[in-house]
Image (spheres, helix red, strand yellow):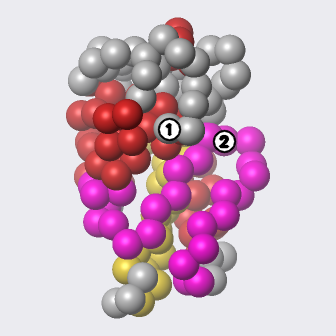
Amino acid sequence: FDSAILAEHNIKRALHGVDDLSWDSTLASYAQAYADKYDCSGTLTHSGGKYGENLALGYTTTGSVDAWYSEGDDYSYGSGCSVYDHFTQVVWASTTKVGCGYKYCSSYWGTYIVCSYDPAGNVVGECDANVLEG
């Protein structure tokens, strides 16, 4: 899980000419603790913590990153942050570390995935400098 989801993030980031993320065990522990608390209801709610965060439900490990990244298909570069915040967090240039966790919910919901990022992306006023066109 760890190496696959990290590799998928870095494949997507390379398309935008930004540095690879490194795996961070503190972030992974934070993400796993939040995933462990999930009630498998199908409702996704962010932790509200100090890290950037992406959530997914019903995707494979790499499929979650692909889904977040696919939001970029409609992203308008140079126009500041918008509703595509999963995409922008994946490719945010100044983010250097990621850690993720997961919980298997059921054959109905599948796997719940949480990724935490540091420094957090989607900072107002910093989008154009951190979301580079691929």
Residue in the image at 56% along x and 83% along y: 40
Could you tell me how far apart the alpha carbons at marks 2 and 1 are, in whole angstroms? 17 Å
Mark 1 lies on residue:
84
Whichever of callouts 2 and 1 sits on the residue coming sooner in the sequence is 2
Which secondary structure, mark 1?
A: loop
Which secondary structure, mark 2?
A: loop
Q: Is residue 25 visible?
A: no
Percent x, y of residue 106 = 41, 89
Whether the residues at callouts 2 and 1 have beta carbons within 8 Å, the answer is: no
Q: Give the range drawn in magenta.
A: 40-64
Q: How many labels does the image show?
A: 2
Residue in the image at 46% along x and 62% along y: 56
Q: Nearer the viewer, residue 106 or 23?
A: 106
Mark 2 lies on residue:
51
Percent x, y of residue 72 = 37, 34
Residue 134 placement: quadrant:
top left
Name the amino acid type tagged 2.
Tyr
Does 62 sit left or right of 51 as displayed? Answer: left
